Amino acid sequence: MRDLVDVTPDGALRLHMHRGQWRAWRSERRVVAVLAGTQSGKTSWGPHWLYREIQRRGPGDYMVVTPTFQLLELKALPEFRRVFEDYMRLGVYTGSPTRRFTFSVTAARRTFGAPQSTPTRVLFGYAAEPESLESATAKAAWLDEAGQKRFKLGSWEAIQRRLSIHQGRTLITTTPYDLGWLKQKIWDRWRAGDSEIEVIRFDSTENPAFPQAEFERARRDLPAWKFDLFYRAIFTRPAGLIYDCFDMNAHVVPRFAIPAHWPRFLGLDFGGVHTAGLFLAREPGTNRLYAYREYLAGGRTAKEHATALREGEPMIPTCVGGSASEGQFRAEFRAAGVPVREPAVSAIEIGIDRLYGLIKRGALLVFDDLARLLEELQTYSRELDAAGEPTEAIEDQHSFHMLDAARYIAGWLEQPRGSRQSNYLAGDA
């Protein structure tokens, strides 16, 4: 079985791509997403795409981004260095103070056909913290394992901002892990006919080196959802998904102008780095709630948050938020003109159950442009045990700010009939 690449006697590289890799290689779309099963040849192929893009776009900065630095050093970086350093001798990788690969003068001349005054660099970033991606202006980006949960929607958005000046292309190579932003922003839009996106999906066995017997063993022994995700790259609802009743077809609606007299509610999740808010409006007569606005901001005083939260609102919403111990936050927001009630329930699981109930009976609908809330609803999950069964623990619990805000306001709205603070059932604002 031939390797992906071999070196000819005159020093040139010859690629031996399988059908899935060839389909991605031929694509000229702005975003090329290779969604493929494990060990199907995604990551080893990525550096070759990136080098061709560098040849096409000329000197400047380029990006390689993975969910974490640990994953970078385990997978993408070794493959990158094998191609850029070992095979092609294009320059030098340095890991400090920042991770980057810099083309040598000789390699730049060889790549572009003439000496270059602008340096060519490949910058390495990680997506668990979107703020780490806000410094470069890049001409193309390769995102490896972008389907993992720690590759945040905010990171995808930050990368697109970094590429906007040069209208740079993006390559995504990943196995799908859940139903988050990758499905919503890439898969769903491609299926809907977005002309800037092309998705190339293939099973692990598209790689001729992957044993058919191993594929059949996985089919036999693994839960169907896990086999479909990790060996077939088919989006499916994973085990442990907490809001498994949420359906993009049933619970998501296009934005419309909400009448000014509809009662408004706001759930707040306080934080030293970010404060998150979710706004709901209640339709009189039906009591149906519409999630219509997200708020996420940091580096502001309580007064500045309060001013931003009130902006554009026809009334001060009924606001609930913070844990039982965050009374100081509530006091500061109250002094700034946004009274915040203490949540009706402190137990996380009760709040989850009340939000779940709203969703399941169709009493909560979400505007289709609330990207963060939609991503969180489809990725908020229980940790799995060694057997792949859900546990009581919530995976990466503290990163789901919109759902925390939603849980606070849902817990208050869904109090049992007759509770002192609840006015939801009575229909009063």
Image (cartoon, rainbow, N blue to C red):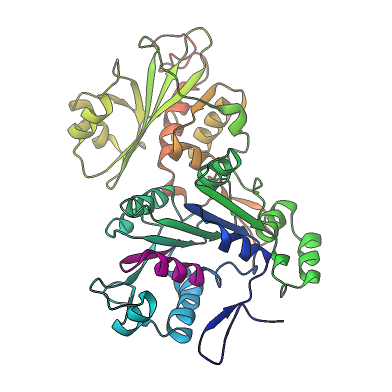
Q: Residue furthest front?
A: 113
Query: In the picture shown, does residue 245 fall above or below 422?
Result: below
Query: In which quadrant of the rendered view does residue 122 lie?
Result: bottom left
Query: In the picture shown, does residue 158 fall above or below 300?
Result: below
Left or right: residue 295 compared with residue 20: left
Residue drawn at 57 percent across, 28 percent down: 251
Can you give x and y, in whole percent of width and height, for residue 222 in the image? Answer: 75, 59
Can you give x and y, in whole percent of width and height, for residue 358 in the image? Answer: 55, 25
Residue drawn at 50 percent across, 44 percent down: 185
Question: Magenta segment: does it hold 51?
Answer: yes
If the image is split into quadrants, where does the C terminus sit? top left
Can you give x and y, in whole percent of width and height, for residue 242 in the image? Answer: 58, 41
Left or right: residue 315 compared with residue 232: left
Residue drawn at 46 percent across, 69 percent down: 52
> Is residue 93 something one can see in this rendering?
no
Please tell me which residue lies in front, 107 or 86: 107
Question: Magenta segment: does it hold 419?
Answer: no
Please tell me which residue lies in front, 61 or 149: 61
Can you give x and y, in whole percent of width and height, for residue 5 in the image? Answer: 59, 80
The residue stretch that appears in magenta: 47-66
> Is residue 77 something one can see in this rendering?
yes
Query: In the picture shown, does residue 32 fall above or below 304?
Result: below
If the image is split into quadrants, where does the N terminus sit? bottom right
Please tell me which residue lies in front, 383 or 116: 116
Total tally of numbered discs in the picture:
0
